[in-house]
Image (tube, grey):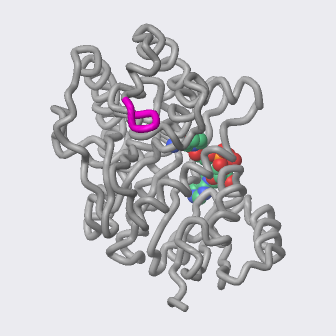
Amino acid sequence: MAEPINVVVTGAAGQIAYSLLYQLAAGSVFGPDQPINLRLLDIPVMMEVLQGVVMELEDLALPLLKEVLPTADPAAAFKDAAAAFLVGAMPRKQGMERKDLLSANVKIFKVQGEALDKYARKDVKVLVVGNPANTNALICSHYAPSIPKENFTAMTRLDQNRAQAALAARLGVQVDKILNVIIWGNHSSTQFPDASHATVNGKPVPAAVNDDTWLNEVFLETIQKRGAAVIAARKMSSAMSAAKAAGDHMRDWWMGTKPGHWVSMGVLSDGSYGVPKDIVFSFPVTIKDGKFNIVQNLPVSDFARSKLNATAKELEEERTEAHSVLMP
Ligand code: NAI
């Protein structure tokens, strides 16, 4: 059996981590032959709660799970990390402006970037889940200059899974019959869920749906606002589905995508599709040997162009705000 790898989960006492940790320990992400050591980072006041999570991890009695380290010290958490799920973030509180949230969170991701830079493996794969995920990933990478930029990604997989499920429901097919739905841009309400290149049983989705108004309005808005709809119903934000998406994202990054399949990931823009550079933007990618490549040469309609521009603009604004917090 392989040597264990160190896997970090931040926000480990929170609700997404609670669903994510089982998937990691059960081998659903890094495979059934890869033992793991879990490094669980949270803030000092959460250490007692985290002890309870550690007890439950022990009680899973899963053979792939070797050591478990609960800690509030980023240096200990990120030591020799091969993979990191950065889930922990300050939640939006009542009366808090988006700007206040961004300001609190970019500071957290600066500290974690510095710790990754100092203590993690140089090939560590970092998935940022905590919001604002795209900009947090940008900041984290900025403060970890010794780790390649392509090792930092932000999660838009939950949006992709939601889009796939919505199309499957509309067309009355099993969810895995829908392929290559794209989420472009920010993990926010400006994201552009794009079904124009998607297929159902190998045939184009737009022809199967045969209703552009539904695709460009109802479908689009449903996916953009799905997170808010879950909060309205559950009084808490998506956690089980977010954890599943985080597992999907990391598994595909680790193991590769199947031939002909694309997945959406927030990655540092290289200017593809006219997207400005130096923002973390969600693109369709294929993955092989642990490296992703942005799918190229997809036709972009005028409608799609306006949506790509809007979400890129929001990310540029977030970047400016983040810089003003960190480098006033
Ligand atoms: P939660 O509030 O249940 O848990 C967050 C945990 O992070 C708490 O235990 C908190 O103590 C911890 N934390 C706060 N600051 C920390 C720090 N500096 N270091 C380590 N841990 C820290 O929140 P939940 O539901 O687990 O969500 C976590 C984040 O994921 C939120 O920012 C949420 O907005 C985001 N999210 C992102 C999604 C995406 O698709 N990208 C989907 C759903 C949620």
Q: Residue 133: x, y in percent? A: 45, 43
Quadrant of the rendering where the C terminus is positioned: top left
Whether residue 138 is visible to the viewer of this picture, yes or no, is no
Judged by its main secondary structure, the magenta piece is strand
Asked whether residue 202 is drawn in magenta, I would say: yes
> Is residue 256 or residue 15 the one in the foreground?
256
Residue at the location (50% across, 28% down)?
Answer: 98
> Is residue 211 or residue 275 the one in the foreground?
211
Residue at the location (36% across, 47% down)?
Answer: 262
Q: Residue 143: x, y in percent? A: 32, 59
Quadrant of the rendering where the N terminus is positioned: bottom right
Query: Viewed as shown, does residue 103 lie left or right of 301?
Result: right
Q: Residue 152: x, y in percent? A: 36, 57
Asked whether residue 266 is drawn in magenta, I would say: no
Whether residue 84 is visible to the viewer of this picture, yes or no, is yes
Q: Which residues are magenta?
A: 199-203
Relative vertical location of residue 63 with respect to residue 286 in this rendering, above or below: below
Relative vertical location of residue 227 with respect to residue 106 in this rendering, above or below: above
Relative vertical location of residue 159 with respect to residue 63 in this rendering, above or below: above
Number of numbered markers? 0
Residue at the location (28% across, 15% down)?
Answer: 303
Relative vertical location of residue 31 with respect to residue 191 in this rendering, above or below: below
View extreme (top): residue = 213
> Is residue 8 or residue 317 the one in the foreground?
8
Q: Residue 89: x, y in percent? A: 57, 48
Figure quadrant of residue 151:
bottom left
Query: Viewed as shown, does residue 286 lie left or right of 228?
Result: left
Figure quadrant of residue 127:
bottom left
Figure quadrant of residue 289:
bottom left
Residue at the location (64% across, 44% down)?
Answer: 241
